[in-house]
Image (cartoon, helix red, strand yellow):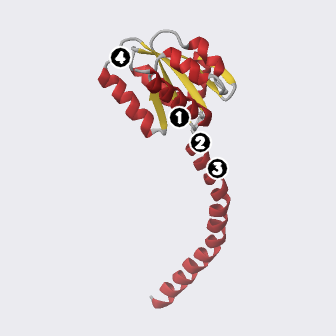
Amino acid sequence: MDRNQKAEVVSALNAELAEVGVVVVTRNLGMTVAQSTVLRQKMREAGATYKVTKNRLARIALDGTDYTGLSDLLTGPVGLATSADPVAAAKVAVEFAKTNDKIEIVGGAMGGVLLDAEGVKALASMPSLDELRAKLVGLLVAPATKLATVTQAPAAQLARVFNAYAEKEAA
């Protein structure tokens, strides 16, 4: 890479870090290209990204963002998983680490809060933003559904009584 390419990588990574809600730092312990591709696909499906960059460039890109404290974690072969949803990147990284022994969760950050590996795992166990929205909608709709069921029940019972009388008189 020449100096211009490095500057482009740093500025792109810095712009991305300014917009994300969470950064998870992983250590790659000899992952194959196929395994890395699978991880990137899973990240994309969850609305997250996974990038492997040079540690020095990543440290420069971290300056001026909420994630400057992560520069201490950037040693050895690391990758950065990022997402706007605070749970998505952590969830995918932790699930992938459970099935693959060649990736290790080092730590991360959510906003200005630094997380260790256990903190990232705890974050991954939380429901995602979409799951929380679905639960909230379910809670809001449940009373209306129950009300509709209760108000329709007497009418249905009356219809059954009238139907029974009609069948009795017809017989």
Of 28 and 51, nearer the camera is 51
First in sequence, mark 2 or 1: give its number: 1
- Look at label 1 and name its amino acid: Ala
137 vs 154: above or below = above
130 vs 158: above or below = above
The percent position of residue 5, horizontal first and vertical second, equals: 44, 26
Q: CA distance from mark 2 to mark 4?
A: 30 Å
Q: Which residue is mark 3?
A: 136
Which element carries disc 3, helix, strand or loop? Answer: helix
Mark carried by residue 129:
2
First in sequence, mark 2 or 4: give its number: 4
Q: Which residue is mark 4?
A: 31
Which element carries disc 2, helix, strand or loop? Answer: helix
Eye-nearest disc, 3 or 2: 2
Residue that protrudes farthest toward the right in the picture: 112
Q: CA distance from mark 3 to mark 1?
A: 19 Å
First in sequence, mark 3 or 1: give its number: 1
Which element carries disc 4, helix, strand or loop? Answer: loop
Q: CA distance from mark 3 to mark 2?
A: 11 Å
Tell me whether circle 2 and circle 4 mark residues in contact (CB < 8 Å): no
Q: Which residue is mark 1?
A: 88
First in sequence, mark 3 or 4: give its number: 4
Eye-nearest disc, 4 or 1: 4
Q: Can see residue 125?
A: no
- Look at label 3 and name its amino acid: Leu
Q: CA distance from mark 3 to mark 4?
A: 39 Å
Query: Tag 2: Cα neighbours inside 10 Å, few (<14), some, or many (≥20)?
Result: few
Q: Quadrant of the C terminus?
A: bottom left
The percent position of residue 124, horizontal first and vertical second, equals: 56, 28
* Residue found at x 66% / y 56%: 140
